[in-house]
Image (cartoon, rainbow, N blue to C red):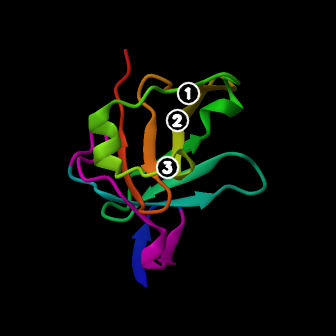
Amino acid sequence: MVCFETSRFGKLEVTEDKIINFPAGLLGFPHVKRYVLLDYEDTPVKWLQAIDDPHVAFIVMEPTQLVQDYAINLDVTMRQTLELETEEDLAVLAIVRVEQGKLLANLKGPLLFNSRLKVGLQAVLE
């Protein structure tokens, strides 16, 4: 069990198997490596809360909730980093923000992770 403080949710406890490791961190946050996904009520939106920094949290959701035919072509490096054995292990999330009542998603910098091994990366797409 890992216990940590957050600025939004107070003190949290999660089991080790819920922690997603981003070895290279996320863009702008290379020092923050460990995160946990938290459900947001009964919606497709989730919070990606940093374990290593109580102030870092992102609103995320599956990009196909916003763009039905959203797809990513994984290159060899991405597959190796994620240690993907099957496509079923791949999870894709987009960081979203709310601006003037609209959801805006970063579809050029999706978060990819192996849902079985809990290892992830942030891709930078053309």
* The C terminus sits in image quarter: top left
Q: Is 118 left, or right, of 43 in this rendering?
A: left
Distance from disc 3 to disc 2, alpha carbons, whole Å, reads 21 Å
- Is residue 97 in sight in this rendering? yes
Q: Determine the CA span between mark 2 and mark 1.
A: 6 Å
Which residue matches tag 1?
105
Residue that badge 2 annotates: 94
Identified by mark 3, the residue type is Thr
Q: What residue is rendered at 61% in x and 51% in y? A: 46
Query: In the image shown, does 10 or 50 lie closer to the viewer?
Result: 50
Residues rendered magenta in the picture: 9-30
Q: Residue furthest bottom?
A: 1
Disc 2 and disc 1 in contact, CB within 8 angstroms: yes
As measured in the structure, the alpha-carbon distance from the residue carrying label 1 to the one carrying label 3 is 26 Å
Label located before the other in sequence (2 or 1): 2
Does 17 appear in magenta? Answer: yes
In primary-sequence order, the first of circles 1 and 3 is 3
Task: Give the number of marks.
Answer: 3
- The residue under label 3 is 86
From this viewpoint, is residue 27 visible? no
- Front of the two marks 3 and 2: 3
| Figure check: 59 above or below 102 | below
Q: Residue furthest front?
A: 85
Residue drawn at 30 percent across, 34 percent down:
76
Kind of residue indicated by mark 1: Ala
Q: Quadrant of the N terminus?
A: bottom left
Local packing at callout 3 (Cα closer than 10 Å; few below 14, some 14-19, many 20+) is few
Q: Is residue 47 left or right of residue 65?
A: left
Q: Which residue type carries mark 2? A: Ala
Q: Point out residue 72 in the picture as x, y percentages from the top left corner.
A: 49, 27
- Position of 37 with respect to 29 (left or right) is right
